[in-house]
Structures are given as C-alpha cells and as structure tokens.
Amino acid sequence: MSDTIYDVVVVGAGVAGAILAKTLTRAGKTVLLLEAGHGTSTLSLDGAAAQKEYEGYLQTYYRAAAKVPNAPYPNRPAAPSPDVLDITAIRGVTPATNGYFVQAGPMPFASDYARTPGGTTLHWLGTTLRMLPNDFRMKTKYGVAMDWPIGYEDLRPYYEMAEHEIGVSATVEELVFPGTSPEEFFGDYQFPMTGLPQSYMDRQMAKATEDAKVVVGDGNGGEAEVRLRVTPTPQGRNSTPNPRYRRKELVWDRNRKRLVWNGLCDDERYQPVGATWDPYTGERCEGNASCVPICPVQAKYNALKTLRGAAVGKLTLEHRAVVFRVEVLPCKDAQGDQPVTGIHYKQYRSPEGDAYEVKVARGRRYVLAAHAIENAKILLASGIANSSDQVGRNLMDHVTLLTWGLRRGDGKEVFPFRGPGSTSNYPVFRDAGFRKDHSCFILPIDNWGWGWPTGSPGADLEEFLGQNLYGPRLLKELKDRLTRQVFLHAECEQLPEPTNRVTIDDNYRDKLGNHRPVIHYDISNYLRKAFVAAKSISDQLFEHAGVEDCSRYSPADACYFTYGGQGFWYRGAGHLVGTHRMGSRPEDSVVNPEQRTWDHRNLFLVGCGNMVTLGTSNPTLTMSALAFWAAENILKDLHNQP
Amino acid sequence: MSTFTMSKGRKRQLLLRKGNAIPPGGGRIDTIAQLHHLLQKAVELEHSTIPPYLSALYSIPEGTNPEAAKIIKSVVMEEMLHMVLAANVLNSIRDPQLNLPGPAIDNPNFIPTYPAALPVIDADFQVNLMKFCQDSVEMFVKIERPRAPMGTPRNCQCISSYHTIGQFYEAIEEALVRLSKKGNLFKGDARNQVPDTQYYGGGGKIYAVGCLESALAALREIVGQGEGVHHTVLDGDDKIGEPAEVAHFYRFQEILYGRHYQATDRADSPPSGTPFQVSWDAAYPIKPNPKLADYPVGTELHQMALQANQTYSRLLHELHNALNGRPELLMQSVKIMYDLKYQAIELMKTPLPDGSGNAGFGFEYVAKS
C-alpha cells in the first residue's frame, strides 16, 4: 500500500475524470487518476506508442464484422464493457445475462459504454448541443419529472468552458432552437471554430422540407401546425478557427476563487487540437463517416486530448485499477459526518483478470467519475451516499426511433456516407407544449445511409447477391439503392422513473469478483406516445421530400413494443444519465448543486449520473460543463479547508 | 489587409540588416518585374521539394517508421505553406499598371522533370523521386542546408542562381526593403491574398501580405522553418504543450541519427534528445524517378499512373485558381490531395512485372482531355 496522500483521488479517465485531472493539476493540486481499462500509452507523451495503440483500435475496427460502437476497443474480462450485440429479449422473470449487464427487464436497456482510457468519447458521435432553458424546469413548465436545482443561466459559463475544452465548431448566427432566442441562449458568444459544412444530403433535405407544415399534438388533446426548420448541429470536431473567438486558456484564480480566462494575443488564433500522437494530424475534420465508432485522424474530440493537457508531475495515472469499494469513517465524526477515508481497488496483472492485487488510494478529496452506471454500482457496493435511496434510480437514455426510406426521382439522390455522421437536425420538436403529454425529441439527419437500421451497405450487397444479381446489374441496383438512402432518428427524452434503475446482486459478479450491473428497465407510455408522434412526423416529412418510407419494425426484435395498435422497436443512443441525481434536498437527491454528496462531505460525484433530466441534447457537453463546475467547487473547497 | 504586428525594435533590426550591404548569393534585383520573376521562381522552388518528400513519405507502409513518417509529413506540409506564402508575396507586389501575372502553376513547366536541379539554386546535387532510404534523407538534408556563413564569397553574378535557399530569400528580402523605399511597392489586389482562415497543417502560419512588415514576416517563416533561426536548431514556431519544433534541416538530421533534438541542443552538435527506431528496410521498393512512359499503354499500371497524374494535374489547376483570386478553393482541394495520396500509394504497393522493384508515382503534368 502506498503512503501517498493526494489532494484529489479521481476514479475514471473518461471525459469527466480528464477534465477534473487537467483542471486540478493545472491549479497545482496532486491528482491520482484510477482507470479500470487497460492501456496507458494512449495517455503518454510518447507519440509513437500512442499512435501504435490507436492504430491497433483502427485495425480491429476494419476487421470487425459488426461495426458497433465498441467494435474497435478491447473488452477485457477484468473490466468488461457492455455491448449492444449482447442485447436479447428478456423472457419472463429470468434476467438475460449473456453480456456484462444483467438485464432484468421487462425491456432491455439498449445502450453501451466503453471502459477504457478516454472512455466513451472514443466512440461518441461528437454532437455538442447545449440543453435548452426549459429542459431544466420540466416540473414548473410542463408538470412532469423534477426541476434541476440550477438553471441554464447558472450553467452557461461552464458550457463555454466545455466548448473550449472539447473544441466545438458552430456558427452562432446559423443555429436554430425552439423556445428561446439566440441572443438569450448565447449572448454575444462565439464558438472556438466556425461551423462545419452541412452535408449534401442535409442541404437536399433542407431544400425539400424547409418551411413545410406538419401536424403534431399540442399537449392539450388538440393539434398544432408546425413549420419544419433545418439547423446545423454544433460538433466536437475540428474546423476553421473562428477569428472572433478570443480565449486562450482557463486558469484557476486563487484570489477570486474561480476559473478565469486568459485571452489570445492580437495575432493568435484558437489552435485546434489534433491527434494525441501528432498535432498536425486531425487539425480539421476530413469527412470520414466513421465518427462512431472511431475517428481515424482524431479530428473528433476524445478525452485523451484533455488528459495530455494535465500538468506534468502533478498527475499520477494508474490503469488496470478497478475500484470496488469506497471506505468511509465507520462512525460519525464531530461534524456528524462520515467522510471517505480511502478508495479500494483491484489492480489486475493480465487483462484476463486471473491475478490482481488489492490496493487503497488516499486523498483529501475523492471524486467518482466512473460513468453513471459504474458510479452507482460502486456506491451501492460500498453502501454509502444513499440516505435518499436514489442511488441507481432514474436511469435514462434517449430512446430512439429509427425511420428510413428511399428518395425517388431523377436527380433526387441524396448521396449519404459523405462527411461526419450527422451535421444537421430538425430542431422544432425539441421543446413544445406536447411535453405535458409525451416526450419531446430531436430529429437529426444522418449521413450514414441505412447503416444503423439495416447494416448498409453490406446488407444491401448481401440482399442483391441473394437475388443472384451480378455484374453491371448488381452495380446498377447498388448505385440506385445506396445513393438514395435517407435515414432519420428521433431521440426521445426519457423521464426519470424510480423503477428504471441499476442494482447489484451478489449472484452476479465479473471475473475479478466485482458486481455486474443489474438493470431494471421499461418503456413508459410517455415515450410510447412520442414514438407514434415521431413516426407521424417522419411520414409527413418523407412525403414533403419525396421519400418512400422503408421502415419496418419486426416483432422478433428484442426491443419491440406496441402502442395504440402500432408496433415499433427502439434503439439506445448511448446517453446513460441520472443514476445519482443532483437536487436541492437530501431527501430526493444524491448530490447537492456543488456536485458533492449530501452524505459525505469530501466525496464528489461527476458525470451524467448527476443530471436530473435529459432534454434532447446529447449529454456529453452538459456533463463536461458540470465537470468544470465540480472542479471549481473542489478547488474552492480545498482552498477553504486544505 | 494584414493583421500582422511586429515590435518596433525587431522591425528596425530587420530593416537595418537588410539595408546593409549583405551580399545576396545571386545578383542584385533592380526592378519590380525582376522581383516578380524571382517570386514566381520561389513558388516553383517550394513546390519542387514536395514530390521528393511525398515519394519518401508515401513509400513508408502504414504502421512502420512512425517517427520518420511524422517528421517528413511535418516538413512537407510546411513546404505547402511556403508555396502559399511565396504566392502571397508575389500577389502583393502586382501593381495593376505593370500588368504582372499571378502565380503560374497550371502548366507543364511548373513541374521539374526528375531527376532535376532545384530551381534557381546552383546546388551540386540532383533531386530524385525515391523511396524512404538513407540516400533520400541525405538528399533532403542537402535541400534544406542552411545558408553559408556571412561573408562567403559569391561565385555567381547572375540573378538566376543562388547557393542555398536561404541566400535566395535573402536576396528577395533585400530587394523588397530597397524597392519599397522608392514608393508603395505593395499595390497588389488584397483579394488575391490567401488568409490564414483558408490554411492549416504544419507549424507556422499564413500571412496575408499587404505591406513590408507582413512580406518580411512571410519570408522569415519560410527561411526559419527551413534552416532554423538565430543559429539554433529551433524553427521559431511553438505550439502549447508540444515538444519544441526544430527546423527542417535538423528534423531530417534527426532521422539519420535516430534521435530527436532538444530545445537546448546546439546547431553544430548531434541531437541529444529521445531516441527512436528507424527501419530503413520498411519502405516499398519503388524504382527511382518513375515515369508514366515506363508502363506500356493498355496495362493496368499505365492506367493507374495516368489516373494519378490526372489527379495531380487537377490539383495544380485548383491550386492555380486558388492562388489567383479564389482562396476558398484551397480548402476544397484538400480532397484531391487525399485522392492523390491513395492513388500514389496504390502504385507504390504494386510490383513491376520484371521484378525490378515496385511502381511509383512520377508527378507528371497531363493536359486536360
């Protein structure tokens, strides 16, 4: 056991942990970062080793038969990751146990994450939408779910920090949001880089549907007419530096006790951050359409870039270190509190998990940044921070309806597979009166053909070969099919429900003897109604654009459900949120607005688990903003009580 | 419009130095037309180094020689920057009344026929298109050789020939300073300038040129990245959080020594930083100076080489337009650069039928069909 006492012990080297590690070490604090995954060369300053490891991921991806989000990354028995390929239907009361998750049902939880250095940012799409003001006040505004203890205005400066760190490309003047104005939303803000070009397909779809009218429910039993708009999507991938962006770096001001900006000099520009092995690779997005699962040039942000920015000499990184217990003072101290006294982890020697050593890490403050599900699992296994009984509850995702079709007609091809995965969306359904009645949703336009719903282009080739097509006829059919594939997906907001939850069960453990997450999950009527509405919108939109709907939802699918006589299946969006939510009262929340647990004064939680509701924004940006918020609070706390 | 700023002291230092009788390697440039001619040569010179560097870079199979590949790539990207910087300076002095053309790129004479001498440099070596090997890296070191120490006697009185690239630019700098004293030299249309928003890759930056200061800054960027500044190995660019960047000459030395320089290393001693592996055997065995004519008409190799040459010619066409008033085309041509890369690599992977090595890509001009 090491005697070192660090200023802060952080668990998890994903985006939240990386932001903590970078911000705290740059403020002069010593940080121990514990990472369950294997591989540190991606983090080291040794460019060649980092490149070799990342190229290994690429080769694995090229060889993989199913190009699912976790396809490129190692899945080790010692610290397994969930995989969407493991999803099966749940029969009766017997959980499905074939993957890392124990799926107790009644419906399968349909998303995954990556337990590897850099975390799930390695395979994220890179969409960086801020949550809308109304997303923070769902109870007040629409009478559902719970309000956040903080509002959009509180988080706005931290969103800007996150956008700087991730390197967001967007042009403020081009963006469209419902329920708020650009002035209210951004003020005089500019993004670090200018917006990426919208794909050819986006522009074709915009031309065909912009201002077209569609009918949607109004939340009071009536109907409302809405005009369609298409807006570019802010993205965490490199574009042209915006000359109007004048911030250089974020620093801790110990006098003012807050994070402040250093500005750029007159002749300086924001510098896009390239690959971890070569600053001149990935300085701009090259339009490879494989953002999920892997950007070949690291033009897309990943957390390894942030880790490389940590202060050398202040950061200690331990990989293959799987945390299994947080130790707290057994009895209450003079302040009536049980502070954390150490973090117990198993450090495995081989990734197969045959041998490991148990170690304890000690610090002045502790941060769990291990992922919404892993954080909940660690807290439940330790029996701590749960006086509210909310740990593990309110698990949420964007429950996603896929719709796809073919755009018919001469010169009407849309040419998918060009450019990043998604560069535009239909924003008008993100916030409206119908949120009283069913989920709101965002409707991104996807650039990867029918890749997600059917497995295109491979699946098309297989289909045509099955019809004995070959030679010029085969080529003609492929060309006709692949150039016309339109694909939309409606990411519907799941609300917090106490019964959608992560638990642990001593009967289900992994190779190291650590608990596997047991997931209890169902799809509410609030969501099912949204699927009906979103499908109707998609039908109307396809009609305006001359797209023949080809969506088919087989009842054999593990994620199939029906509502009002219509059948659908859903997919997960990988947006796992809400297992240790923040709140203004210790009775119904796990952390306070500072991101500190109500029950243990030196234990902070960061990550998507703190989010109260999900809105229609991919949660990484909001989580990153909250991580900066937490970092500032921890620095203040260490300043006041070293 | 230029956003360039330079401290007064630095400016005076430059002006004084240039005003003194430091002899350029070649002769004296007396007219704007002569200066214009030499700037066209500068664009050609910067371009002429790109094919040999790319030949070596693309001959390295993916996943091998990562450090050497990174070094060559960083240099070749900066040569592209230099080409654009030279074009900006050229465009800046195009007084409309003198009717001087913009940079001429889209024609067969723009490309050297390899093996070739460097344009305007009276060097004692030929430049070849070769695979990555000790010979080719030694050739790169010669290309980037720093200028001779001051006071070295000139052996050439004409304005068409210089000892080193550094001396060539020194003559251009001197002429810019002197000619600008006779009145406004920078009468070119600002719309022809490529701004820094249209360029990325490599260290250094684009200067839109509209005055003497920005013109000198552009030339300093070219020479500093090539040879190093202030008798150090450093190139004057730095990037937050990255190791110190050394000039091209020293970067190629790093490959030969298999070891990086450190910021504190002296220019006249070997590098003392982190060592790295160089596998001289890991390179496609391309035959030097390949030509389209090497491959019989009708063969697949001929078709592949023809297509690659067409891509290259299309790229020059786009670059020509970009540097002649349509800077937005520069970014758009990046796609063609990638096409070229993949087509060149396919050729280099293909063995010749006679077993004498692999095919290669010759960077030849093909007129539009």
Image (spheres, rainbow, N blue to C red):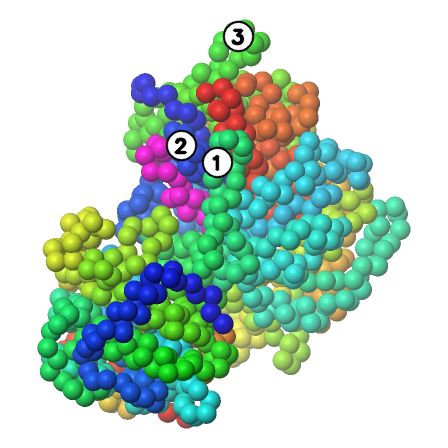
Asked whether the residues under marks 2 and 3 belong to the same chain, the reply is yes
Number of numbered discs present?
Answer: 3
User: Taking A420 as reference, is A173 left or right?
Assistant: right
Residue highlighted by disc 1? A252
- Kindly report which numbered mark, 2 or 3, lies closer to the viewer in this rendering: 2
Three-letter code, disc 2: Gly
The residue under the point 57% across, 75% down is: A480
The residue under the point 38% across, 73% down is: B212
- Magenta span contains residue A305: yes
Labels 2 & 1 near each other (Cβ < 8 A): yes
Q: Which residues fall within the magenta stretch?
A: A300-317
Three-letter code, disc 3: Asp
**Disc 1 versus disc 3: distance between alpha carbons?**
32 Å
User: Taking A524 as reference, is B72 left or right?
Assistant: left
The residue under the point 56% across, 35% down is: A629
Mark 2 neighbour density, 10 Å: few (under 14) some (14–19) many (20 or more): some
Residue A108 position within the rendered picture, expressed as x and y whole percent measured from the top left: 60, 39
Residue B80 position within the rendered picture, expressed as x and y whole percent measured from the top left: 34, 72
